[in-house]
């Protein structure tokens, strides 16, 4: 047993060392998938965890009450609520006004709340930069500040009155920009989108031009069910909003991004499997000989499978670790900027559930992509494995008739693919997935990225974050697709060295051989691209609520041509390099 | 099976293809090889001698017929059973050496012993002894790429002997070697023959046949001639005697 174990370890270590480049490529391929899955799972927490953390840190209320009336009538309506049965704590009422904020030439709607420095039992906004409110200053919710492009120290105008931005702060008592105003009742001066700002209580009357302000009262109940049994309700002229409604509204900001990442994780997983299969396929030739050799000296199928699987499982485990770390480190980039909430998904180590899911994915990719070739090799006739012959293409009369009428380059391309049909399938899968992701991204880019808040438009944080997630997925996908394309073309060129040398001895020029190799890759890439564009568009339409705009046809055409051009160039380079070697070398 | 024959084949047939493309690579061959015999199988390219060797070693399955090795019927054995048989009872020597490129000479030699479940220490000692026997003790830590063709083949022969097999099967062992390297291999085979090792060699080389106790000529998948030889051999010279397809030994 010790001897066999030693043998498995020795063969694994030596083979990994001998094929460093392939090992690194495999690691990159599987890590890309595991990193994206880590990111997707981490963003699941982004729906709830940061809000919960913010709520705990700022003593967030269970329910926020806002009367429809203003001024003294509003105060009178709210007064009995503070001492209502079941209420254990309250803060407010705080005056609020629906005003217009001007910064950098843009005038947008803002909900302004009047606060002071007195301690509050509930809703104590956490200052993230600068200081809390003071006379002459305004504190802005950070997502809103980001969209406006203002920082602490800048000057903004509220209803035409200049105020210095003294800080930014987050709260759990109101949804972040652009959903800071959630009132549903008719007659509201602002009904949909707005940012949130705080000023000193003494100034709100001046800012509102002496109009009577509205008020908001924060409540906490002894019974948790009192705040979770509803999201929003209107009773006795008062609007009640529970914390679950605010959490859901905040979560909507990252919902699309999370979906993009989850779909991206699946696409990346599929591409990673294709990538691993691609790299493994490149090794099959050598593997088959190795298997034949092991069989000849008495290794059984189980031993052969163990030798090969051990290698891939080690790579899979390393990739799981790499992917977890990369995903964990990248997650804050998607949740931190302007999140309007405290904490981020990446600041805590990944959960055990995430570690398990990622490890299982990495091992499954490694096993799935290698099991088939390993088993096939293990059950291959030993003599054939040692002889290592390529699968002869099936001869059909019509194929022979057709091939005689083809231009040389096309004929070479067709024949190269006929020798290794599985490699052609992998090229198709590679281009299909890459084009799908690119088409979906271009659909995303075609959407309106702005939201209108009164007179001006500002960047939509939801769309920005969704595009960020899609960009991230597409960049990783493109890197992986590039790795795939390079591996595929190089192995194809190396594998076809001998038949291409024969073609050259029969009179094919280096240009024809190069073009033939490019054609071999382009033939399966064309259906991949043709399918990828509608699949990408369809995927975006399914995943996006409402009626998204279609990207211009010229964009999609450009995507298709760019992918095909990249495939052709990536193939032509190694093929051209191969034609520089003397024919005799390849024939030996 | 008869008691004295280590290897016995009866009506062994191997066909490839079907219909008009049917090739009878081995056609109803009967063979008995007693323990300790050195048998050379000769014949033109494509006559089926390599296929027969693969069938005898369990690397391929016959289309029809029976093969017995050391009282085990191997033609219907499972893949695992065949692997176990090769591991313990058969050593192979190939024309292309088939060494593992990533393993050193000594690691290649101990491969079969480790597969057979020997302890690493014992397997290493045996491998070093065998390398010493084939004159490559000073090349034990070299990778195959750092060895000459003759040295690689000697490593392959050492590997074939590592589990003290009942039968060594060699397929064109000198086919890729120059004259000097061929002589080295010939000396090893002569030594094996003297030590009583059962050896079946497929070869084109009359010098290899000259060290055999028996020479079988094959043509079109069947035996054309079967000559048992006696006497001594002079390695490095070809002293033809006998009739037709018999080389190098005095009858």
Image (cartoon, coloured by chain):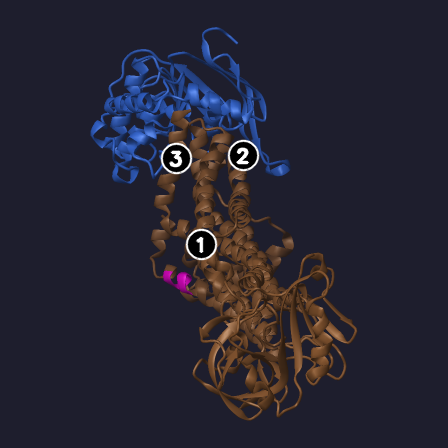
Range of the magenta residues?
Answer: A573-577
* Chain of the residue under the numbered disc 3 shown in the image: A
Please indicate, yes or no, whether residue A524 appears anywhere in the rendered image: no
| Image quadrant where residue A237 sits | bottom right
Pointer 2 with pointer 1, Cβ within 8 A: no
Q: In the figure, what tint was chain A given?
A: brown
Sooner in the amino-acid sequence: mark 1 or mark 3:
3
Quarter in which the N terminus of chain A is drawn? top left
Dot 2 alpha-carbon crowd within 10 angstroms: few under 14, some 14 to 19, many 20 or more: some
- Classify mark 3: helix, strand or loop: helix
Q: Which mark is residue A325?
A: 1
Does the segment drawn in magenta span residue A576? yes
The reply to whether label 1 and label 3 mark residues of one chain is yes
CA separation, marks 1 and 3? 27 Å
Residue assigned mark 3: A9
The reply to whether label 2 and label 1 mark residues of one chain is yes
Residue assigned mark 2: A379
CA separation, marks 2 and 1? 38 Å
Q: Which circle, 2 or 1, is nearer the viewer? A: 1
């Amino acid at each position: 047993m010790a001897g066999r174990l030693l043998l498995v370890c020795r063969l694994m270590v030596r083979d990994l060392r001998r094929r460093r480049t392939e090992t690194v490529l495999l690691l990159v391929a599987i890590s890309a998938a595991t990193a994206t899955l880590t990111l997707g799972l981490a963003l699941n927490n982004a729906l709830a965890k940061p809000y919960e953390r913010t709520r705990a840190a700022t003593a967030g209320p269970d329910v926020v009450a806002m009367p429809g009336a203003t001024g003294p009538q509003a105060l009178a309506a709210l007064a009995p609520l503070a001492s209502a049965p079941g209420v254990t704590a309250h803060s407010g009422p705080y005056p609020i006004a629906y005003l217009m904020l001007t910064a950098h030439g843009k005038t947008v709607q803002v909900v302004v709340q009047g606060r002071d420095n007195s301690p509050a039992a509930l809703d104590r906004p956490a200052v993230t930069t600068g200081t809390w409110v003071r006379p002459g200053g305004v504190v802005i919710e950070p997502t809103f500040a980001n969209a406006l492009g203002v920082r602490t120290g800048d000057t903004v105008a509220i209803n035409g009155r200049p105020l210095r931005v003294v800080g930014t702060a987050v709260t759990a008592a109101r949804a972040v920009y652009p959903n800071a105003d959630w009132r549903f009742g008719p007659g509201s001066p602002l009904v949909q989108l707005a940012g949130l700002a705080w000023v000193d209580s003494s100034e709100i009357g001046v800012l509102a031009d002496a109009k009577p302000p509205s008020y908001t009262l924060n409540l906490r109940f002894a019974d948790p069910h009192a705040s979770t049994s509803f999201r929003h309700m209107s009773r006795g002229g008062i609007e009640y909003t529970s914390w679950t409604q605010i959490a859901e509204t905040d979560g909507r900001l990252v919902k699309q991004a999370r979906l993009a990442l989850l779909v991206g994780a699946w696409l990346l997983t599929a591409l990673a499997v294709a990538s691993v299969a691609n790299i493994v396929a490149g090794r099959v030739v050598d593997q088959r000989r190795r298997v034949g050799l092991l069989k000849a000296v008495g290794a059984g199928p189980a031993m052969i499978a163990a030798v090969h699987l051990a290698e891939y499982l080690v790579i899979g485990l390393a990739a799981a670790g790499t992917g977890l770390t990369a995903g964990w480190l990248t997650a804050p980039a998607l949740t931190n900027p302007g999140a309007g909430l405290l904490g981020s998904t990446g600041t805590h180590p990944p959960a055990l559930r995430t570690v398990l899911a990622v490890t299982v994915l990495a091992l499954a990719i490694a096993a799935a992509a290698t099991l088939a070739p390993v088993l096939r090799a293990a059950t291959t006739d030993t003599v054939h494995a040692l002889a290592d012959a390529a699968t002869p293409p099936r001869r059909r009369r019509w194929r022979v008739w057709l091939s005689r009428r083809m231009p040389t380059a096309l004929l070479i391309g067709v024949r190269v693919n006929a020798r290794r049909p599985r490699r052609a399938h992998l090229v198709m899968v590679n281009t299909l997935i890459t084009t799908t992701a690119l088409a979906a991204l271009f659909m995303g880019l075609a959407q309106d990225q702005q939201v209108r808040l009164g007179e001006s438009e500002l960047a939509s944080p939801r769309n920005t974050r969704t595009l960020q997630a899609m960009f991230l997925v597409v960049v990783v996908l493109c890197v992986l697709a590039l790795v795939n394309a390079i591996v595929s073309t190089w192995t194809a060129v190396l594998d076809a060295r001998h038949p291409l040398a024969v073609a050259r001895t029969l009179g094919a020029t280096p240009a024809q051989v190069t073009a033939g190799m490019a054609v071999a890759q382009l033939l399966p890439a064309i259906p991949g691209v043709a399918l990828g564009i509608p699949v990408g568009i369809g995927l975006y339409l399914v995943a996006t609520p409402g009626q998204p705009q279609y990207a211009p046809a010229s964009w999609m055409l450009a995507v298709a041509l760019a992918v095909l051009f990249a495939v052709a160039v990536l193939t032509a380079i190694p093929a051209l390099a191969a034609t520089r070697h003397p024919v005799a070398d390849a024939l030996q | 099976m008869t008691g004295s024959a280590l290897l016995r084949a009866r009506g062994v047939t191997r066909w490839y293809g079907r219909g008009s493309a049917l090739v009878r690579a081995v056609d109803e061959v009967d063979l008995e090889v007693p323990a300790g015999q050195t048998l050379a199988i000769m014949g033109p390219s494509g006559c089926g001698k390599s296929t027969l060797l693969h069938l005898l070693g369990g690397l391929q399955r016959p289309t029809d017929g029976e093969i017995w090795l050391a009282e085990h019927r191997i033609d219907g054995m499972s893949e695992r059973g065949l692997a176990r048989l090769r591991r313990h009872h058969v050593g192979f020597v190939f024309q292309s050496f088939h060494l593992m490129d990533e393993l050193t000479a000594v690691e290649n030699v101990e491969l079969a012993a480790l597969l057979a479940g020997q302890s690493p220490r014992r397997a290493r000692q045996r491998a070093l002894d065998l390398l010493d026997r084939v004159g490559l003790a000073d090349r034990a830590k070299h990778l195959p790429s750092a060895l000459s063709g003759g040295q690689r083949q000697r490593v392959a022969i050492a590997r074939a002997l590592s589990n003290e097999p009942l039968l060594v099967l060699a397929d064109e062992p000198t086919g890729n070697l120059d004259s000097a390297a061929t002589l080295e291999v010939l000396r090893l085979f002569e030594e094996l023959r003297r030590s009583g090792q059962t050896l079946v060699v497929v070869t084109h080389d009359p010098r290899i046949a000259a060290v055999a106790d028996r020479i079988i000529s094959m043509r079109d998948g069947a035996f054309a001639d079967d000559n048992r030889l006696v006497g001594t051999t002079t390695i490095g010279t070809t002293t033809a005697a006998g009739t037709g397809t018999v080389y190098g030994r005095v009858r």
